[in-house]
Each structure stands twice: as C-alpha cells, then as structure tokens.
Image (cartoon, rainbow, N blue to C red):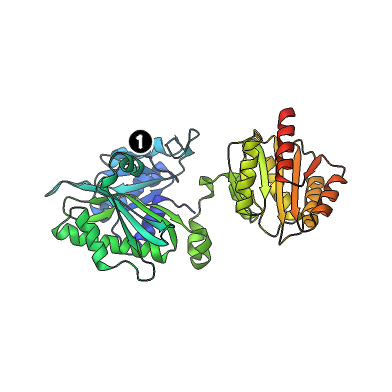
Amino acid sequence: MNIHEYQGKEILKKYGVRIQEGIVADTPEEAVAAAEKLTADTGTTWFVIKAQIHAGGRGKGGGVKLAKGLDKVAGIAKDIIGMQLITKQTGPEGRKVNKVLVAQDVYYPGASEPKEYYMSVLLDRALGKNVIIYTTEGGMDIEEVAEAHPEKIHREHVDPAVGLQGFQARKIAFNLGLEGEAQKEMVKFVTALYKAYDETDSAMFEINPVLKTSDNKILAVDAKVTLDENALYRHKDFVALRDFNEEDPLEVEASQNNLNYVKLDGNVGCMVNGAGLAMATMDIIKLSGGEPANFLDVGGGANAQTVEAGFRIILKDPNVKAILINIFGGIVRCDRVANGVVEAYKKIGDIRVPIIVRLQGTNAEEGARIIDESGLQVKSATLLKDAAARVKEVLATA
C-alpha cells in the first residue's frame, strides 16, 4: 500500500529520523496558514510547495516549486492544487493533485555546500535479507544512476535475525565520504531509518534525496513509502493512511470484494483462481492473438458472489472484447464455480461480450455440462489449447 510523502515523513519522525518539516494543505488558504506556522516553528522564510501524489518525478512535471517568501505561497499552491500532474510514473494520463505539502527550505547557506544522497531499504528476495541501497548521486532517478554509474551504487545486506549492526551503519557513512559530525549524524540516520522500515513491516522506504545540510545535519527531504498490506493487521492505524483517490477505482472495488485485481491495457478480461494460473492464462491470451485486460484472482473459495463481483469489475472496462474464466477445481469444485457463473450471468444480465469458461479438476465434466446446458452465451473448454482456440475464435468476430 503506497502512502503520501507527508505520511511517510510522519512515520520516520516517530522513529527519530530527522525530516524536512512540513504541513499538508488542501487549499491555497491552508497552504498560507501552514507557511506561517512553519515560520513560527522553524524560522524558515522560503517554502517548498510539493504536490502529494503516489508517483515520483514530481519536480520534473512541475509539481515541486520554491516559494521565495510568504507572499508567493498562495499563488504557487493554487497552480499546483487541482493540476493534472504527469510524470514518468503516472503515465500519459497523469494524476490529479488534491493536496500539497508546504515544507521548510533546508538548502540554507552555511559553512559548507549541502550534499544530496540516495538511500532505500527493501527486501532482497534472492538472498532472503533486507538490503540498504545507497549512493552519493542523490536527487537523480536511481535507474539512471545504475545505468550510467553502476559502480557508485552500494548495497548493505542486513540479516533480519540480528538486525542492522553498528559497523554496518558506520560503513555506509564512510562509503558516502562523510567524516566528523556529518558521519555521526549519518550513522544515526541510517540506524533510525532501518528501525522504521523493520518495525512497520514495510515493503520499501526510499529517501531521495537524503540531505547533508551546510551545518552537517542529515535529514530526509523526501519519503516514498510502501507498506506491506499483508501486515496491516498488526498496524491498524496505517489503514487510515490509504488514499483511494490515488488508486484505480476498479482495483479499489476489487479489494473491497476480497479480489486480487490489477488493470492492464488489453482486450481480453480474465478471471482465475491462483496467481500462477493467472500468469499462464495471460500467456494463453497473448498466444491467441489477444492482450490481457487485467489480472484477476478470485482465490480458492470462488463462489457465486465472488464470480459476480469479478464479472462486474471486468465488464466496467470498455476495452474488454471477451472474458476467459480459467478455474482449477482443487479446493473449490468445478460444478460450484459453473453454477456461480450461470447465476452471476443471469443476475447481471445483458452481457454483450462472449465468455469462455475453462474448468479443470474436481467435477470438471459436471461443471462443463452445467455451462453447456445453461442456454447462455457461454462457451466451455477443457484443455488450455481449447480455451486458446475459443479466445482466438471470438476475437476474430469481435
């Protein structure tokens, strides 16, 4: 589950990570009030106005601007709030900005030049260990750094059984070229960052940039945080951080029906039980000349209600020209799924796209008979190659 920058920073601050202070605002008037409070609390007189969307590259898209004085805040906030912000990560359609973060200016003059770094914490699945990825090339896309200067990217693996050790935090500070007070501050920063990642059961913490200020403070200027939805039962307060405005409406509806759904750009909707079978089904669709319109896993307990919910979600995609239902009857019987398909079809009514149902496993023959005798515009298949042939057939006439 992705959360906004200001929410990620609030989590970091609770764990002792120094952050660029800021206040979220929904309107230009709230932005001005936030700036006034920041001046009172931090003494800052310049402010960074940052669009709050679940995507990176906001600055390049015009979603991050510097207000050189309180009198500039309202105008900049008005320009950003409500804009359709387009970045590399939003796609060409962009994302509507509903709120901004008014943050203190941390690039103030001092004894030395400020310096930006990149740092992230995530799981290295291949090794079964957490890994801290960091580089001196902060403020840039990590993919660009990896391509142009792979030697500048460092990795520090952490055994989850023992946690981050002191020597590892010091090694990171050393590799970043820090010394003296800045080195000590970076050790504290890394230690607190890893603790925040570990204790919140997060999937990723990405700080870009991590800033060394001109007076050697180390702080998080940005925060991209992905929480692990499977661990939300242990962090019930995190559930309220979810912003449904930032998610695809169909994916939200699917989650509310306990379905695993990801919208894609194809023309054949698919409904399956099991992630592995879903991937195979998507391959079959492509081999048949189509493109998968979605990933939809109804789980092992598919019934009339879940099938109906899946139908409704798939049919809301105007690009769908056919639907392939591919169910392996292990935990759930195929005849039960077939009855669910027939019941859902009749309940929804007026389904204008052809449906192919491939059932295999427990009571597969009985399930196929139920489909064939239903009198509905639903075609059954037993083998994957049969399902592929039917998909190709219906696409040819779509």
At 53% from the left and 66% from the top, the residue drawn is 233
User: Would residue 77 appear left or right of 393 to someone viewing this image?
Assistant: left
* Occupied quadrant, residue 387: top right
Q: Residue at x 69, y 34 (%)?
A: 321
Q: Which residue is mark 1?
A: 60
Instruction: Check the picture and name the quadrant holding the C terminus.
Output: top right
Count of numbered tags: 1
Relative to residue 49, is residue 178 depicted above or below? below
> Residue 97's image quarter?
top left
Residue that lies at the very extreme toward the top in this rendered image: 397
Q: Amino acid at mark 1?
A: Lys
Q: Residues within 10 Å of mark 1 (few under 14, many from 20)?
A: few
Secondary structure of the residue carrying tag 1 is loop
Position above or below: 330 against 392: below
Q: Which residue in the rendered view is the most extreme toward the bottom?
A: 162
Residue 235 coordinates in the image, percent (x, y): 48, 65
> Residue at left 31%, top 63%?
192
Spot occupied by residue 154 in the image (x, y as percentages of width and height): 28, 52
Q: Is residue 246 left or right of residue 14?
A: right
